[in-house]
Amino acid sequence: MGRKLIFLDIDGTLTKPGCNEPPESALRAIRMAQRQGHKVFLCTGRNYGMLKPLLKYGFDGFISSSGGYIVCGREEIYDCPMTEEQKHKAMDILKENGIYRTVECRDGAFTDEAFKEFLQGHAGEGGNSELLRWRRQLEDSLNIQPMANYQDEPIYKIVMMCHKIEQMETARELLGEEFSFCVQEPDSYGFINGEMLNKSFDKGQGVRRICRCLGVSLENTVAFGDSMNDWEMMETAALSICMDNGSQALKKLADAVCPSVEEDGIYTAFARYHLLDAC
């Protein structure tokens, strides 16, 4: 068995969403795999600032901002924020179409306060109170700041939320030549979620860039994810594994499904697919 490069999404895969503490079983699996000669990378939509708390666990590098900023070992091998023209065009069009924005720079993230204000004004409807609590917790744990604090830093990714799919489709029509849109399945709160990336990169291209840096064939790659924004990574890797807590759409596309993030899924899959064995 040759050396494998293992790529792990964070939220919903390595950790519970918005959490910075992986299960002990996952950390044990990662350490065991590394001792056997395999290399383990984070491959996440989080920016560098959001994933930084996890670097203390000794990963071999990371693909952040869904492929926009990549470090292999100690070497920065890719850095591709939006151009100034792209940034201002995207921000304006999303705002004009009533889409709530969270912009992710390399070290910080900033969100439209209008979304929380909307939830507060409709807190008694459906699951809005629960969603508002979740948003506050997520922003605290990942240090997402109000948009008023944004100082025009370079942007790598924009996370979007809106009420109607038509809003997202209008933005896609206006921005689709330069940007890829990944729209999630409608959530139980009645909102549409998505993210917008420069077409110059994605998680799958990030996997390829790490492989080229290390001179390792794609045949020796394994990817773990839980949502459709992991699809390019899963499609690129030789073996793709979806968490049981993941989206139904991704489960159908993945090569295999492992137990959930809270049921020792990473450790179980590492053992099942011989990632704890010597190279």
Image: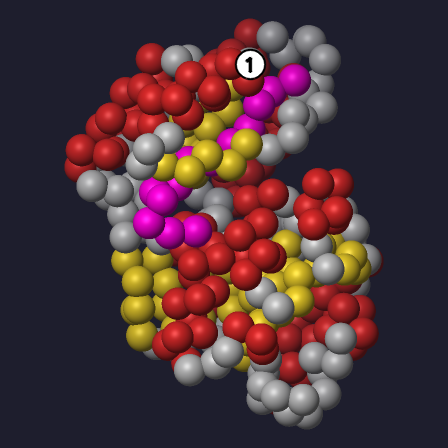
Residue 58 appears in view: no
Residue situated furthest bottom in the rendering: 278
Count every numbered label the image shows and give the total: 1
In the image, is residue 157 part of the stretch drawn in magenta? Answer: no
Percent coordinates x, y for residue 74 in the rendering: 34, 76
Percent coordinates x, y for residue 239 in the rendering: 66, 67
> Which color mode does the image show?
secondary structure
**SS at mark 1 in the image:** loop
Q: Is residue 209 above or below residue 67?
A: below
Q: Amino acid at mark 1?
A: Lys
Residue at x 62%, y 68% (from the top left corner): 238
Residue at x 26%, y 42% (from the top left corner): 82
Question: Which residue lies under the disc numbered 1?
Answer: 164
For label 1, count other residues whose C-alpha is less than 10 Å away and answer few (under 14), some (14-19) or many (20+).
some
The C terminus is located in which quarter? bottom right
Percent coordinates x, y for residue 100 in the rendering: 44, 22
The quarter of the displayed image where residue 52 is located? bottom left
Residue at x 58%, y 77% (from the top left corner): 220
239 or 103: nearer the viewer: 239
Residue 274 appears left or right of 7: right
Residue 114 appears left or right of 31: left
Percent coordinates x, y for residue 236 in the rendering: 54, 61
Residue situated furthest left in the rendering: 84
In the image, is residue 196 part of the stretch drawn in magenta? Answer: yes
Q: Which residues are magenta?
A: 190-202
14 or 79: nearer the viewer: 79
Residue 86 appears in view: yes
Residue at x 49%, y 57% (from the top left corner): 204
The N terminus is located in which quarter? bottom right
5 or 169: nearer the viewer: 169
